[in-house]
Image: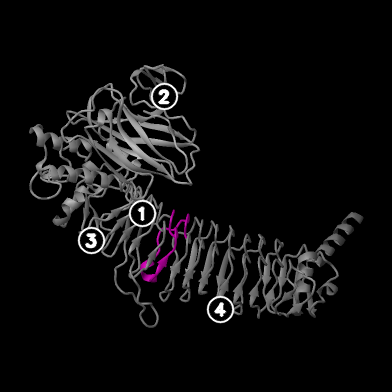
Amino acid sequence: MRKLFFMLLFLAATILNCQALTVNNTAGGLANAVDDVNITVLKVTGTMDARDFLFITESLTELTSLDLSQATIVPYNNDKALYSTVTVYNGNEIPRTAFFGKKLTTVNLPRGLQTIGFAAFAGCYQLHSITLPASVVYIDDYAFAGSGLTSVVIPRTVTGMGKGVFSRCESLTSAVVDCMVLNNFAFLGDVQLSSVQLGADVKYIREGVFNGCKALKTITTDPACRLTHIGAEAFINSGLESIDIKSLGLGTIGDWALAQTNLATIELADGMTDLGTGALANNQSLTDVVFPANAHHGGGRGAPVQHNPVTKVNDFTFAGDAQLNAGNMLNEGIVTIGNYALYNVSASIDTMRLPSTVQYLGDYAMAGMTGMQTLKTAAESVPELGIEVWAGVDQPNVPLIVTDKNSLSQYKSADQWCNFFYEADDYLLGDVNNDGSVTISDVTALIDFMLNGVGEINMAASDINGDNTVSIGDVTALIDMLNNTNAKMSLNRIKSLVALNELTTNDVLASQPISLRPGETRTVEVALNNIEHDYTALQCEVILPQGVTLSDVKGIDRGAGHSYYSKQHETETNVYSLIGVSMKMNTFGGNEGNILMLTIAADEDFNPQNAELVFTNVLLVDTRHDAYLAGDALSPINNASGVEQITANKQIANVRYVNVAGQESETPFDGVNIVVTTYTDGTMTTVKVMK
């Protein structure tokens, strides 16, 4: 009986503790009005200030239910900070972190509340619902972040929001929003959020608002809603399957805003001015995009507003959209297609069309478009290109259709454009020998034909200067065209073109180690070791260290009967294109020794540490006009005196190749080789060569 009595007594005490305690408070007096800090339910009427909230924050650790509906929050100023470093507290404002991490399950907010402070309810994971009074005008950063809210309604009276207000609310499933601005990361990572309704007043969705909302498939909008802007990463990595961009009248979509979603189709708003970097990238289900019409666009409510149309497909806009039907997507008015804009858009496309307004395609802009069957361009002037625009595309088997026949010859001779397939009666200007590319072998084929009438050449492709005859003027024009073209292309691009020639050789073009000091000018003798073949011409790129320039090229010894032409690269100023050819089809006499001499000059700021002179993209052409690709050769440069050896009058006794493992051979190994040349007087030189 006694045991039962104590159990009933304990139960009564527990029930008493759970009863709602109502306090008619005077600001600052709550700590004196609450005797039991273990209460779970509290209702406050009267007035409150920051001191009362601090008492709740620090002392009422078991509180689960709080009713402030009949309370009024009044200002409080104090020299001593209560929350963080804050000393001034406004009226009608819940202080920052006031209920951070509390066990609250229900809260009734004051009817006159205007501001909810920084992280005020953050981490309240048991708080499943809350009603924001119509008086609320501002919600500060992370106010409800990580809370247990399952639904939320943001009234139109909210004119300002901080960052991440409802972020990481993993139980949140629905949101009704009627405020003008959804600020950065408002619903970031709310993985259960599946229903979003936007009211008529919503105009801005800022950065990362729905980032990672996996359950969100679409958003519902009021018919009068007119969004102006969707910010960067607004819907990235969400479950979005559809959004009515056109009806919303969006003017701009930020960087990566709709990337990594489940969108299948999208129609952009007429008059849109900006589609950001990567805005629709990596959407594996995206098949159709309708670009905005290039017309002035009404601003929804009120007087029409004029917009400039989208003129640029930004970098990465559609990158990774493997199923995108891009063939007819780009409309007139598009001027620029940015870097990687259509990268790996690999769906089968019968004809990819470029509008007449396109002037530039950026680096890798259409790389990986392996399903493209035909490319058709309406641009009269050949658009400029970045690096490797069509990398991975089988260009020789993709026809290029040029709608303006007057510009056909320019397309055929332009870098990268020239690699597409043209109809049988067409030709690639400069491709004298019809091998599909323009190299030094075309120069020798043209010279040989003019001198001896030997070989079959494409007469139309040989008329470089367009005078309807084939003459020595076409030879010099072809040399100029080749040098000028190479001076505009990257080294990797030239490498990919010359590598089309299947023939390779172990013969090498190289120089000895070089002594060069700041402010000094040197002549560098360049040798050709050609045991495998006899050559009549060469083409290569010379890479000099920064601070070193090439001022002259002259044939010597075995190459004295040849003419040499050099051209400085337009953007990589330490790179020079070099051509050596004999107008009489002379070969480089003998098999070993010097053929040309470079004059190089170092400026006063030249740093010889780790400096090298490099010969790369070396093509050697034999008397049958077969082109052979030789390995790269690297000659070290240092500032030590006496390093150079005079070898013009020396005879080579032996050439050996040494690999990185120290093995020796009379022929080069694959990879890095050290070429050791021994002369008859017993001296030696070494050069590093890549095969």
Nearer to us of marks 3 and 1 is 3
**Callout 4 secondary element:** loop
Mark 2 residue crowding within 10 angstroms, few (<14) / some (14–19) / many (20+):
some
Nearer to us of marks 1 and 4 is 1
- Residue 259, magenta (yes or no): yes
Given residues 175 and 604, the one toward you in this image is: 604
- Disc number placed over residue 144 in the picture, else none: none
- Report the residue marked by disc 3: 356
Magenta range is: 235-260
- Report the residue marked by disc 4: 157
Mark 1 to mark 2: distance in Å? 49 Å
Determine whether 346 is above or below 657 in the image.
Answer: below
Please provide percent x and percent y for residue 166.
Answer: 58, 64
Mark 3 residue crowding within 10 angstroms, few (<14) / some (14–19) / many (20+):
many
How many callouts does the rendering have?
4
Q: Earlier in the sequence, mark 3 or mark 1?
A: 1
**Callout 3 secondary element:** loop
Given residues 76 and 433, the one toward you in this image is: 433
- Report the residue marked by disc 1: 341
